[in-house]
Image: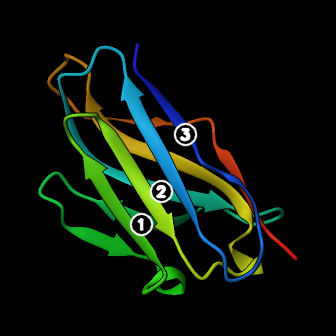
Amino acid sequence: QVQLAESGGGLVQPGGSLRLSCAASGRIFSINAMGWYRQAPGKKRELVATITGDDSTNYADSVKGRFTISRDNAKKTVYLQMNSLKPEDTAVYYCNAGINAGSGRFNDYWGQGTQVTVSS
């Protein structure tokens, strides 16, 4: 079975930084795009950033210039460096990855989520 495990969330003051990590494990033949999404209370889940297999990146306008997504293919891990955090960044952050677990097709997998709270 494939699992995505996030870590690195927590409480940080406005202007601070956090680094999220998400490691994929299990029966994995290959990983396509990976990304981060977030869901604030009362709101729909939204895209934060994605990164393709050839390191092409895409960001939500609200985080451009503040967040950086990266990946380590050898470790099957995706990272999200978050700088200049704002209270409106408060949300549960979810990792997502397109993974071929042996079927030849890429299916979407999600992590369990990690809470990020930006508050003074």
- The percent position of residue 23, horizontal first and vertical second, equals 41, 34
Q: CA distance from mark 3 to mark 2?
A: 10 Å
Quadrant in which residue 80 is drawn: bottom left
Whether pointer 2 and pointer 1 mark residues with C-beta atoms closer than 8 Å, the reply is: yes
Horizontal side of residue 68 vs 53, given as left or right: right
The residue that appears at 18% across and 61% down in the rendered structure is 55
Whether pointer 3 and pointer 1 mark residues with C-beta atoms closer than 8 Å, the reply is: no
Which SS class for mark 3?
strand
Which SS class for mark 2?
strand
Q: Which mark is residue 49?
A: 1
Camera-side residue of 71 and 53 = 71
Q: Which mark is residue 36?
A: 2
Horizontal side of residue 85 vs 54, given as left or right: right
Vertical position of residue 119 compared to residue 107: above or below: below
Q: Amino acid at mark 1?
A: Ala
Comparing marks 3 and 1, which lies closer to the viewer?
3
In the rendered image, the quadrant that contains the C terminus is bottom right
Mark toward the start of the polypeptide (2 vs 1):
2
Q: Amino acid at mark 3?
A: Glu
The residue that appears at 66% across and 75% down in the rendered structure is 16
Number of other residues with Cα within 10 Å of mark 1, as a class: few under 14, some 14 to 19, many 20 or more: many
- The percent position of residue 24, horizontal first and vertical second, equals 38, 30
How many marks overall? 3
Q: Which residue is mark 3?
A: 6
Q: CA distance from mark 3 to mark 1?
A: 15 Å
